Image (tube, helix red, strand yellow):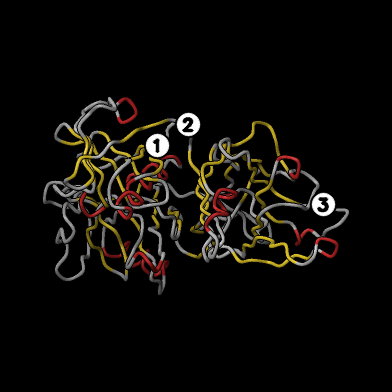
Amino acid sequence: MKTAVLVIAGASAGYFKVDRAGLQWADADKACKAKGMDLVTFENEAEYEKVLEWLGDTTDAYWTGYRDDHGTVEPAGYTRFAEGEPNDKMGDEFCIRLRFGTLNDALCEIYWAGPKKQNIGMGYICENDEEFAIADKEDGAPNDDLIVSGPVMTEQKFPSHIMSNVYRSNKKSDAKLTTGVFERVPDKFEHGRPVYVNKDTKRYLSYSYNPEEQMPTDAKWKFSAEHMVGPSVGGLAYIESQAMSPDQIKPQAPCYFFRVFGPKKNRRFRKMNCIFDVDLKGFDGEKAVGVKFGTGPKSKLSMVNGVYLPVELDNINEAYKKVGADVYAVKRDGEWVFVETRDIHTKRAFARINSSENLVDIDLNSESFMGKKPSDFLTYTF
């Protein structure tokens, strides 16, 4: 399936932007190069002003092609830094972003702008020296003077695994029905949407819609037993969303369980709310590594334990990022350390494993610590 989201603003050709993409600098750089473009830099003040005019009055932030890895901003070009920038405020801030009309340096690994709780993802701007047309005008005429913003005609790809965290806020025992890792069932779809199964609990995550009993707007994603997958409207928990894939369901989507009450001959049902924000994350099972420390404070175990995917970090040879969290597993100085974003380039860590092997191949007898206390651990694949 193909999707096209085009937001068109009048300006000179040669630029492409994605608002709030939520990408680190390296991923934004790859996204531009995949289009045959580069992250934007500015030849002169006129070009800089032209891009600012296009962006308008916005709180969004955008990665640029500038970096200051060696104390000098490169490549050469026109720059307009905010007062006191660049300043390496959070450590080795090698990457340069544009926000509020000026530039500032930032950690290349961040993917948000401003306070993280505001949920403003880092966008990016690509440029191409040659003028080109990406879209047609509404009347069908060729469009050779437009800047196009947003993803353009990309194929729908479904994640091989879904990490789910959905449970009743007042009854966490229901978590076994709806939490954990769900693996995609090969070649099985419901109304164009993939079906997933948690192999440990034998619970399924699928799209529920019966055209003989429901309107299209009644369709929902649901957790259920296997026999309820398909035209059955029955299930264990429901999320009101018509998203094409579970990882596209918005966190604020209404979610509920059914509670049975009343005498057996006159049984009724009552909706019971799920947690406030539905949390469903997709990931690639072929690249993922699970990490589980066995002993330590619950808060630290919750922070460190989980599923990690490989990422590229500046000046780090091997690194993984936890799915759905800003926690990294980084190999440095002959050991693996588990850190938050701000500590990637410091000596602080929540947990350590004394091994220089690949994360998935670490000997389980390797010395490991949660904080300063010894802790057992295991790693696993999917």
Front position in the image: 237 or 43: 237
Q: Secondary structure at mark 1?
A: strand
Q: Secondary structure at mark 3?
A: loop
> Residue 54, image x and y in percent?
42, 67
Please say if the residues under marks 3 and 1 sit with CB atoms less than 8 Å apart.
no
Q: Secondary structure at mark 2?
A: loop
Front position in the image: 108 or 243: 243
Q: Amino acid at mark 1?
A: Gly
For the residues labelled 3 and 2, the Cα–Cα distance comes to 33 Å
Q: Residue under label 2, please give it.
A: 382
Q: Nearer the viewer, mark 3 or mark 1?
A: 1
Q: Amino acid at mark 3?
A: Asn
Q: Residue under label 3, please give it.
A: 210
| Vertical side of 361 occupied by 341: above or below | below
Question: For the image shown, how many numbered marks are present on the structure?
Answer: 3
For the residues labelled 3 and 1, the Cα–Cα distance comes to 37 Å
State the mark number for residue 290. Answer: 1
Q: Amino acid at mark 2?
A: Phe
> Residue 135, image x and y in percent?
58, 53
